[in-house]
Image: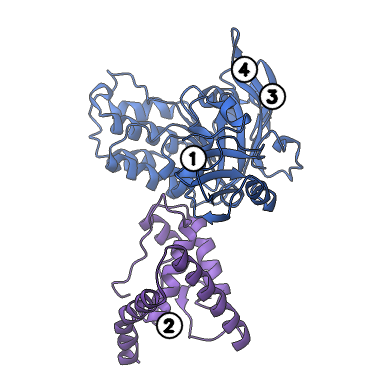
Chain colours: A blue, B purple
Amino acid sequence: MISSDEVDVASLPDPGQSVIRAHALTRYFGNKCAVNGVSFSVPRGSVCAFIGRNGAGKSTTIRMLLGLLAPTRGRSMILGHDSLELPPETRARIGYMAEGHPVYPWMRVSQYGTFQKGFYRRWNQGMFSSIIDYFAIAPRTKAGELSHGQRAGLHLAMTLASEPELLVLDEPDTGLDPAARRSLLEAMIHFTRNRERTILFSTHLLDDVERMADHVMVLDYSVLRVACSVDLFRDHVRRVLAQFSGPPPRELPDIRGLLRATAGENDLTLIVANYSGHTERLLESVGAQTVVEQPLSLEDALVAYIGRHGKKDLFSAGRVES
Amino acid sequence: MSGWRVQIATGSGTPIYRQIVEQVRLAAATGALVAGQGVPSVRSLAEQLLINANTVAKAYGELVRDGVLESRQSLGYFVAEKRQVFSRGERLRRLRQAVDDFVQEAIFLDFTADEIQRAVEKSLTALEWCEKATEAGQ
């Protein structure tokens, strides 16, 4: 399930446990393809991190899931409904925090509580107030005077006060100071006290992915490359060090799943998806004397998927970065 | 509860749940945690470490399976009485495996037999005070 090219997640049987399912979701803006045939599912009760470089298509995907943007092709389901035909009562069960935390600058924080309350049948004012307090916000403050972290706190308070069962957070942690970030993570952990609740969050902070997520999705150049549990991902992506008697070869045979190859003086470090004994034999066939597996952090494994700076051809040609 | 705390590092080659397993196992083996002592609940450790509660649950599950912790209904998790869940043969097999891995790694790093032995002794000495503390406490 590491690569969406290999397994179509949406085609796998679903015992009714997914809160989100996307099938071949595609969106063009003019000629530009923003999201290309993305299929995945988010299991109920999971904390799913959605990562990818800026412009990879994360926000576009999220907006399609929520029915805020129509797909060019494909479809998605959220809480059992087609994203484009979401009844208001189902929408009320979803808490969505948009990127950048926009606010009406003239409105006071306390007024936001009253204003927002009108849109929801369920509204937990105690929850709203305690999160506002948690982010050290005075209720009389005008939203325009809040810091970036406090604006995130205000959005979080509005989102959580409606007691949703699904949280969709678009880069909630971007630009937060350490205290605000800690409050955000604490709120996320608190939210999942109820095991039926689900979080989908996009982020650039891989540290937060490692702390919070049990599932991970990687979107790279509009294509979904990873959609699986974090355990499975860590299990499948490995780093090996191949040692040679002299300089390593400049050209490599076609190694399936090769994500990154870095040359040292007499060695090659490879990060490989779906690593197997076959990879080791291929390396030995080009002169590797020893092939040793090395520990690989989740962060490095994820960066191997997203940090390639567009050098796609370099890899398919099997050439090596030095 | 003693001053003992789990500490985790992100960005490490060791997954967080494995860091928790290893630290609790070591603390129980050296006496920093003693039999019958309670450990934080899944929720409170998750909130303290700022991590997904499932990660703590997974670590505790493994520690219970290996006989390091025991779960007492509605009371939480406690350090189990030391007991061997493995036969002597199995323990020896695991020890040999651990030693082989360690020696191979050390030789790969170009250390001599002497240096390796000294490093092992130093590491054992460092654990000794904990052992003594355990004996004194019992």
Circle 4/circle 2 CB separation < 8 Å: no
Q: Residues within 10 Å of mark 4 (few under 14, many from 20)?
A: many
Q: Which percent across, then down, holds residue A133?
A: 28, 41
For the residues labelled 3 and 4, the Cα–Cα distance comes to: 11 Å
| Mark sitting earlier along the chain (3/4) | 4
Which three-letter amino acid code belongs to the residue tagged 3?
Answer: Arg
Amino acid at pointer 4: Arg
Which residue is disc 1 drawn over?
A: A262
Label 3 vs 1, first from the N-terminus: 3
User: What residue is shown at x 76% (from left), y 36% (from top)?
Assistant: A11
Chain containing mark 3: A
Q: Would you name the residue on which mark 4 appears? A: A27
- Res B72 seen here: no
State left or right for residue B121 relative to residue A222.
left
Chain of the residue where label 4 is placed in the rendered structure: A
Q: Residues within 10 Å of mark 1 (few under 14, many from 20)?
A: some
Q: Which disc is residue A75 wearing? A: 3
